[in-house]
Every structure is written in structure tokens, then in C-alpha cells.
Amino acid sequence: MIETGKNAIINSIQQDAQKEADEIVQKAKKMAAERLAFLDKQQKNIYAEAEKRANDQAEILKTRISAGMKVEQKRKALSVRSEILTKTLDVVFKEFKDRMQKPDYADYLLNWIVEAAIGLDSEKASVNVSERERHFITPKLLKKAEDTVRKMSGKTVFLQLSGSAPLDKQGVVLTSMDGRTAFDNRIHTRIKRNEREIQNIIYEMYNLTGERA
């Protein structure tokens, strides 16, 4: 009987110990699972944050590259328009230079003189041109210019060939007799006065769109 009682006590203690061990193991497994779940969530959060930062950096880089490309495209467009404008004007200057060899060039000078005389609005003015144009300025041409000014504006003007040194560029310059005012009607100056309109015409001819230079 005593031996049986001891066995019962021992068995009871072993059962309690086993139960307690099982509980400890379950708690340990639960804690391990929770720890793993936390680490997994933390890892996912780290990956998500890293991905977001990478995407943000990619967007910033993409924006910078896009802006740089637009600036470069605009720079190239401006360069192309400028080059075409320069080449076109070179052709224009050469064309007018070649026209000096033709008899009807006097008609161009006449129109420029009349325009300058009306713009100057002086009763007396001297007419100056380049050395190559000098022989076109005859008394007959000046008289015709005076008559044309009178017909167009109703004003009388007296014109004479300038005694100053010839101009260095093609075209005409009219100066009042007192030397206080002048009207520059040289080719370069005429183009400069109409530069924006000339640019627009050239850009439209070559189908160059975009902001004007």
C-alpha cells in the first residue's frame, strides 16, 4: 500500500511537471511566432520604405532629366533658328550687294532716299551712300526724289550729295543741313528695324515653331 501511494505521488508530480513543461513550450512557441511575425512585419515595412524612397528618388531624377532635355531642346531650337536667320540674312545682304551692279538699282536708292527724307522731315538734307553707290546719286535722281517727297507728303525738300566720307555699309543716310538730325536707311539698319517681322517670316517658312528669340 505504501509503495502504491508513492507511485501515485510520483506519477502525479511527473504529470504536473510534464504539463508545466508543455505550457512552457507552448508559450515559447507562441512568443517565437509573435517575434517572427513582428520581425517579418518590420522587414516588410523596411522594404516598403526603401521602395518608396527609391521611387521618390527615381521620380526626382526623372523630373531633372526631363527638365534638362527640355532646356537642351530649347537651346538647340534657338541655335537652329539663329543659324537659319543668319544664313538667310547673309543671302539677303549678298543679293542687295549684287544688285548694285544692275542699272535698276537706282530705283532702290530712290525709294530709300524718299523714305528717309519723309522720316527726317527737314527742308534741306544731304544724302550719303557707300563708295560703290556714289555714282547712282545724280542730280536727276535727287530731283526725282524731291518731287516724289512733295507728291507723297506735300512738303518741299532740297537734297544734295553729301561732302562727307562715303558710308562703310550699303544704303543711304540723310542728314539735316545743321547736322543735328539724321535718318539712317542703310540695309543693316532697315533690317534691324524690321527684325522681329523678318524673324517670324523666316521661322514660318522653315516651319520652326516655339518661343521667338
Image: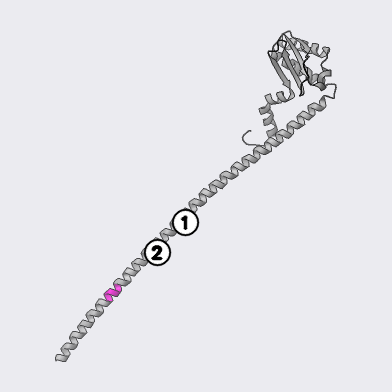
Position of residue 150 relative to residue 88, above or below, is: above
Residue 194 shows which numbered tag? none
Residue 42: x, y in percent? Answer: 39, 61
Q: Nearer the viewer, residue 156 or 154?
A: 156
Q: Residue at x 79, y 30 (%)?
A: 94
Query: For numbered disc 2, what is the local secondary structure?
Result: helix
Q: Residue 45 colored magenta?
A: no
Distance (Cα) linking label 1 and label 2: 16 Å
Earlier residue among tags 1 and 2: 2
Q: Amino acid at mark 1?
A: Glu
**Residue tagged 1:** 51
Residue 56: x, y in percent? Answer: 48, 51
Q: Which residues are magenta?
A: 22-26
Residue 72: x, y in percent? Answer: 62, 43
Q: Amino acid at mark 2?
A: Asp
Position of residue 87 relative to residue 103, above or below, is: below
> Could one spot residue 206 in this view of the protein?
no
Q: Nearer the viewer, residue 125 or 62?
A: 125
